[in-house]
Amino acid sequence: MSRFILCILAVTFSSQLSGQMFPLSDHYIFNMLAINPAFAGCHDALSTTLSYRNQWVGFKDAPKDLILSVHTPMAHDRIGLGLLVEDNSIGIFHETSFIGNYAHRMEVNDGIMALGLGFGAARYHIAWDDLDAIDSDDEQLPDYPETEVLPNFSLGAYYYTRNYFIGISLPLFLSHEPDQKSGKYKLKNDFSNYNYFFTGGYTMEVSPRIKLLPSVLVKYHPGHAVQFDSYVQVILMNRIWMGAGYRSSGMLIGMLQCQLNYQLRMAYSYDFDISRSRQYKNGSHEVVLSYVFKYERRVKGPRQF
């Protein structure tokens, strides 16, 4: 089964590179730089987040994602700068990307409105020689590794207050297709191939020590069905976050998070597969560690979002 899926991916990948593989994340609220460049600087201090996701446990050559984000406000909070490093793999495909992020921030009513731009490059590596071909003499199957380094861009807008946030972004929207003459990939801007990400969430106070945080992530591509992730988290004394979520691809999600102090946050989640493909794989694990460095001015505490 896994070899069949890898063969399908190989044919698709060799015909066109549609940009970066977008790794899933149950904790996107706190590491949104991975999908929206306008998130840079929103923690009001130098902030770094490291996440690791092991997807489809028990499935050979399943996706594994490592994401490191670092961002900070600059110039009296008018500018946000960030760096995003991602390392994603699935089967014989391996991708490493370095994306710089710039956000222009402005006060609007009681919140901050940010417009962001991401720019960088990704290294795509296909280990064709790791495939076990039924016909080793098939000329259509390369027997050597293939590596390409390709540029890309992201756009986004993000508005947040103490109690809610909304965002829209086009992460890594450029496509790449092979040039038949040179054998290399060339850039292509195809509006029908954009991925639109919409995010939103709101904190509701149930009591002085208990809050509720419902949130949603909607992913839209003109050629595919709309996908969505919906979550509800309970916040206890601004220290413990417990929640559950549902992903439209057929996943139930359990989440646990601990705010150890104003600077250090740890989180874990597990995805339960309830789709028909659960007979081939188990769930997915995700671990997140976030640290906000010392604040340069007196504030009540770190931003919720």
Image (cartoon, rainbow, N blue to C red):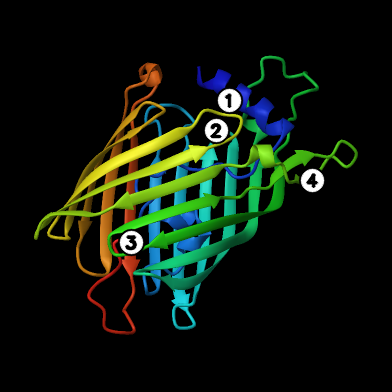
Q: CA distance from mark 2 to mark 4?
A: 24 Å
Specify which label sits upstream in the sequence, 3 or 1. Answer: 1
Q: CA distance from mark 2 to mark 3?
A: 29 Å
Residue at image coords 75%, 30% = 142
Q: Quadrant of residue 137?
A: top right
- Closer mark to the observer between disc 4 and disc 1: 4
Tell me if mark 4 has few (under 14), some (14-19) or many (20+) residues whose alpha carbon lies within 10 angstroms of its own: some
Indicate whether 32 appears above or below 44: above
State the residue position of label 4: 186
Label 2 or label 3, whichever comes before in sequence order: 2
When the figure is inspected, residue 258 is found, relative to residue 264, above or below; the finding is: above
To which residue does mark 1 refer? Answer: 6
Q: Tell me, yes or no, whether the two marked residues, 2 and 1, touch with CB atoms within 8 Å.
A: yes
Does dot 2 land on a helix, a strand or a loop? loop
Expressed as whole percent of the image width and height from the top left, the position of residue 256 reads 22, 47
Distance from disc 4 to disc 1, alpha carbons, whole Å, reads 24 Å
Sequence order check: which comes first, mark 2 or mark 1? 1
Mark 3 vs mark 4: which is more N-terminal? Answer: 4
Q: Which mark is residue 91?
A: 2
Residue identifier under label 3 = 290
Q: Nearer the viewer, mark 2 or mark 3?
A: 3
Location of the C terminus (image quadrant): bottom left
Left or right? Give the position of 177 relative to 121: right
- The mark total stands at 4
Specify few, some or many for label 2: CA neighbours under 10 Å numbering under 14, 14-19, or 20 or more: many
- The three-letter code of the residue at mark 4 reads Lys
Q: Amino acid at mark 2?
A: Gly
Q: 209 left or right of 294?
A: left
